[in-house]
Image (cartoon, grey):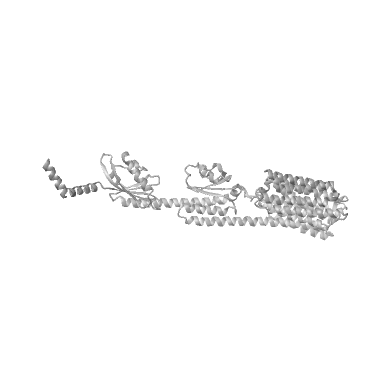
Amino acid sequence: MDRRQVLITTVYAALMAALGSAVFLAPGLDSVAWAGIGLCGAAAMVVGIRRIRPRRPAPWWALAAALLAMASGDFLFGLTTDAGGDPPLLADLSYLAMFPCVAVALIGLTRTSSTFDGRTGLLDLLAVGGAALLAAWVFVVGPRLDGGMSATEWSVQATYTLGGVIVLVVTVRLVAAAPRNPSAVLLAVGAAGMLAGDVAYGIGQAHGGLAPGGPADLCYIVLYASWGAAALLPSMAALTDPSAPAPSGDAPVRGLGMVPLFAAVAVAPVVLIAQALTGPVHDGPVIAVAFGISLALLVTRLSDAVHRHAEALRRERTLRHAGTVLVSVTDAGAVALAVRTAVRELLPADTAHVIVVDSSLTDLLPLNELSTPRIVPVHLVPPLWQDRLGEFGHVLVCPLDAAVLYVAAERRDLRTVQDAVTVLAGQAALALARLALTEAASRRDSDNYLRAVAEHTNDVVLVLDDDERIRYTSPSVTDLLGICPTPFATLREIVSPADREQVDATLGVALTGGRDGTRDTWSLRRPDGTRVLVEVSFRDLRDDRLVRGMVITMRDVTDQRRHELDLLRRHWEDTPGAANRDNSARKYH
């Protein structure tokens, strides 16, 4: 923690200690002290939300509202008891209003928390456990209660206890899922304090009333202090990070099924009917609260199922659209664009990420790098991309036939889309393979056509690949240069070492001169020692889908140039000046 965080936490702890001491040292001011404790805890949550800015702040706002509701009840309870009266109904309503706020917060934590692989089992456990606790309270504990409390008071107390048990179960489940998260531990400590305080309050009420400064007050102070401190720690953001599904290959988490959940919801009406048939209804409030909790759990379970189904439909729709686009692409750049667009749509909204489709290093990667999609630390990717992907800790690596897809994001987001991106990578690999086969077939047809045309001409036709190796040579090269080029030879290798300088100069100009072509004349030495004068023409057709290479045409112009020189010499000899020079030479010699 930084210095400001330490200062805020220290000030909060000092305020809580001072207000808690006032509860025990000044019982007459306990209503003011409880109001201060509640406001301090809620203010701590507001400060934590504003400073840490979790991605999903709604659960923490609900917890702050719960603390305010409980503080209102404590303030009203303290005012009434200080005056010697009975606790007002408004105080009980404030206490009961705390549980819906806590329920909203816990539902939000379990729904968005990255610590949960699935909350189906937790929801089933809470529903069945709450129904069993309700039945045990009404049919076992209730008939054996002491007469120190009325039936309504015991029903309200049972409601508090039932809510405290559920809150404690959920927070303990959070701690089990994230044992190193201090905020989760503090939430569980506060839930334990709430349950212990409710039990101590019930015992005190059953034995003649609750005196200020007792064990129940200490437990409630622990509740306020722990929940407020949980929101001040940076670890509170991790509890509301988006959840990720189980890794690929793991079995999905399954609950008890819908039948036990529906049965748990039906327990409350059955208990109510049973009490109505056997006498007056003594536990109406607790039955109503238990039914509301069970119904909320059922709705949450169904909402989760609908949400999972909607996400599956969204991923399916994205993959279907991407498959349609990949079927019609005509080049590798369109494949890369379609893959980037689909991955961006598959990732959760507003997720920071970097997508790289690399086809330059596949020959340098180990075999297992191209075997199966997986999430790896960023330092394991090729150094060429580490600077671009380095802001994230992990990268999803997927093979794409002749390329590799790198998706860099937070690990939880990568786990969310891993299965869908694996399917997308398979579709992209098929598209790239189709393009490669189509290009190979087109090149073969082009070479066959070129061979059929060039085999019956005296000109030499060569086709160079991107690496300057000769892919095709017409048979007339043997007549022109007196050699038989070896497979995959370069242009420099088929000429004499003394002639390579002029070949390199012309080739360099041709590679940077565009599609208009480059012309030059070479004087090449044959293996028999004779020289041939060759007119060379270069055309850069590497971007042509049917050629994909540099086309070179060579024509033997030795006889043509010799004839041109002979004509020039004869023309020069027939001029008057040439005749005068001949006469002078004969006269003086």
Of all residues, the one furthest to the left in this rendering is 587
Q: Position of residue 588 (x, y in %)?
A: 12, 41
How many labels were placed on the picture? 0
Indicate left or right for 364 with 511 as reference.
right
Name the quarter where the N terminus is drawn. Answer: top right
Q: Tell which of 202 and 140 is nearer to you.
A: 202
Q: Position of residue 92 (x, y in %)?
A: 81, 56
- Vertical placement of 586 versus 343: above or below? above
Name the quarter where the C terminus is drawn. Answer: top left
Indicate left or right for 207 with 17 as reference.
right
Q: Tell which of 520 and 526 is nearer to you.
A: 520
Q: Position of residue 31 (x, y in %)?
A: 82, 52
User: Quadrant of the rendered structure where residue 499 is?
Assistant: top left
Q: Is residue 373 visible?
A: no
Q: Is residue 322 visible?
A: yes
- Vertical placement of 302 versus 485: above or below? below
Q: Position of residue 468 (x, y in %)?
A: 38, 45
Q: Tell which of 233 and 195 is nearer to you.
A: 233
